[in-house]
Image: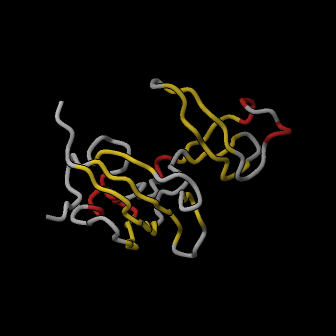
Amino acid sequence: MTLQIEMGTKVTLHFALTLEDGTVIDSNFEREPATFAVGDGNLLPGFESALIGLVDGDEKDFIITPENAFGQHNPQNVQQVERGNFDEKELEIGAMFSFQNGDGELPGVVVELQDQHIMIDFNHPLAGKAIVFKVKILTISPQSVH
């Protein structure tokens, strides 16, 4: 009987994440494969659900929509921060800074420079983008029993 990927199965795979224009975000096809248990939180649910039902040797490409990948771009996550909080030498569009919030650090990217303020985008850099998820399933193991 062929084992299919389902919740709890251990999967070893090669993967690549690219934008629809072909820009590579991450890939391990040239490195060691990744191993994880489906449902362990290592993979976003939208990526995991694409794998359900695949078997050893499967090679597939999936388009993961923004809502199932890194979320839609939220305009409310673009915030105004006083310019005095920054070292002027480091201020440029696209510069990334870490900000303290209640839970630790939150990365933000400079999107606009104004006289008194800087506009910072706290959305995930891949928010609003569809992701091409390419996988090659190497092995599937049954759910481990604790």
Q: Residue furthest bottom?
A: 21
Q: Nearer the viewer, residue 139 or 120?
A: 139
Which quarter shows the N terminus?
A: bottom left
Q: Residue furthest front?
A: 1
Q: Quadrant of residue 22?
A: bottom right
Q: Is residue 140 left or right of residue 108?
A: left
Q: Nearer the viewer, residue 29 or 26?
A: 29
- The answer to whether 66 is drawn above or below residue 12 in the figure is below
Q: Position of residue 41 (x, y in %)?
A: 33, 41
Q: Is residue 113 left or right of residue 45?
A: right
- At 50% from the left and 63% from the top, the residue drawn is 16
- The answer to whether 97 is drawn above or below residue 67 in the figure is above
Q: Position of residue 36 (x, y in %)?
A: 35, 45
- At 67% from the left and 47% from the top, the residue drawn is 110
- At 49% from the left and 46% from the top, the residue drawn is 77
Q: Residue furthest right?
A: 89
- At 77% from the left and 44% from the top, the residue drawn is 115
Q: Nearer the viewer, residue 93 or 24?
A: 24
Q: Is residue 9 left or right of residue 90?
A: left
